[in-house]
Image: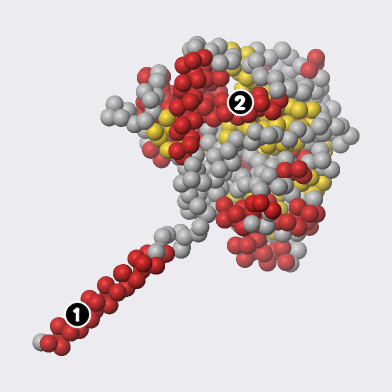
Amino acid sequence: MAAAAAQGGSMGPLVGAIDQGTSSTRFLVFNANTSELLSHHQVEIKQKFPKEGWVEQDPNDILQSVYECVEKTCEKLNQLNVDIANIKAVGVSNQRETTVVWDKQTGEPLYNAIVWLDLRTQSTVERLLKRIPGHNKSFLKSKTGLPLSTYFSAVKLRWLLDNVKEVRQAVHEGRALFGTIDSWLIWCLTGGKDGGIHCTDVTNASRTMLFNIHSLEWDTELCKFFGIPMEILPKVRSSSEIYGLMKISPILSSGALSGVPISGCLGDQSAALVGQMCFKDGQAKNTYGTGCFLLCNTGQKPALSEHGLLTTVAYKLGRDKPVCYALEGSVAIAGAVVRWLRDNLGIAKSSDEVEKLAAEVGTSYGCYFVPAFSGLYAPYWEPSARGIICGLTQFTNKNHIAFAALEAVCFQTREILDAMNKDCGIPLSQLQVDGGMTNNKILMQLQADILCIPVVKPSMPETTALGAAMAAGAAEGVGVWSLNPDDSTAVTCERFEPQINPEESEYRYTRWKKAVKRSMGWETAEPQVNGETSIFCSLPLGFFIMSSLLMLIGAKYISGNCK
């Protein structure tokens, strides 16, 4: 990377990409001619867990992390003798569904961002289901491609309107703006309260449950169903066009990238699909990040799944370009399980150590881990599920649990790949992969073994950021990046072939499915008093305790009078 960068200004146009994920923010700069990554910087994002099942992030922390990553990356480029004036555009890729509401007059968030993993809206979902004939979760799928679930933005926004006075008041007074993380960042980076652009792209809009994926517009009936005022919604744009120009921020001491157009915007999984050059029907990729997401391009017509998958907008690479759709299998917990082993259980100090622990034993020794920390997503859509570890014996140790955790990621991928193959009718002959977890070679080999097909990993795994950069560089008015596959540089890949027989793979998968069934039905949506169970929730127990207290007081009173 440094050797290529040392050529300085002769390398031609560059494109930057903001990759704002659930666990970290990064800014990466690519050579538009070769797709080579020149430099990047990464900042970990703190997640807040104020109550069980709640997951929040501070929108200002997210914004500051973007500024820091831009500044540090530009400093690194200067050290490599690369002229940052060659950065011709910036693209944005973001964690999807995560919901922010802010005040357009002050520029301040009105509440923490509610993260896509958050489960507080389960009671909201159940209340909405009661209004649907037959309590059918798929009732809105014909318009949205999505089942009614805690996962999507509309129910998070409904919760904010129901439970946060500041949000309700700002909406009433016309001060509130809603957006997913892309909208928040683009608004802030293009001026914020001083003329910031309030927009989103079709891929992020399609994850809200308020967007009609056929007409590509906010849907009045959907907004009415959820009780969402349409005036707070961002304008929907294509994934590749100039939205606005970067404004100077006091945080950026160098004034880095001021005046550079923000011209690409894709939800992270759509960005990875573009970055993997999956432009043809039937091409698919699987991204291993905080969660795990398998997307298959279905072309210009949306395909509705009969096996628990989502229908989503894949991309629309230009105002006048056609929209393409994808089938998606979404898994809530992938890389997050490694973070949980590190931060919650303390059995490892780093993600690399989890890989080493697993490698030392090479087996889970009959131990199976279902990391349903946020319920189960595709193909079950079962919010009542919770995480379990089955098959423990006195022999089980932390190594086996580490192995079982990695194996769980692979089993979940097998479930959504099976559903994808049933919906598409043509099984995938290999799986293209990307994301931070693909650096784990044990995981990649396990995945090939459990799927019984080869797993192919590009040598440059930053395909999510690459996709955002491609969309930005190809935008009308920028035009420094060709999206024609024939013009792209050949990508070298690492290939993992299955090393166990299909019978063993099937046996382990069957045992995993047995564990999944046992994880279901653990939780209900009934709210607890102040987050704690009250003894008076049980009427007989309440009467028993009260009568016992009265008897004790009475006995003390009588004994006192007898003295």
Residue at the left extreme of this rendering: 563
Q: Secondary structure at mark 1?
A: helix
**Depth check, front residue: 266 or 85:** 266
Of the two numbered discs 1 and 2 on the same chain, state the one appearing first in sequence. 2
Give coordinates of residue 307: x percent, y percent: 65, 33
Q: Which residue position holds label 2?
A: 418
Asked if residue 146 shows in the view, the reply is yes
Name the disc covering residue 555, or none.
1
**Depth check, front residue: 280 or 348:** 280
**Residue at x 30%, y 30% (from the top left corner):** 393
**52 above or below 498?**
below
**Residue at x 81%, y 32% (from the top left corner):** 301
Q: Mark 1 belongs to which amino acid? A: Ala
Q: Callout 2: 10 Å neighbours few (<14), some, many (20+)?
A: some
Give coordinates of residue 162: x percent, y percent: 63, 62
Residue 81 placement: quadrant: top right
Q: Callout 1: 10 Å neighbours few (<14), some, many (20+)?
A: few
Q: In the image, 304: left or right of 495?
A: right
Q: How is the image coloured?
A: secondary structure
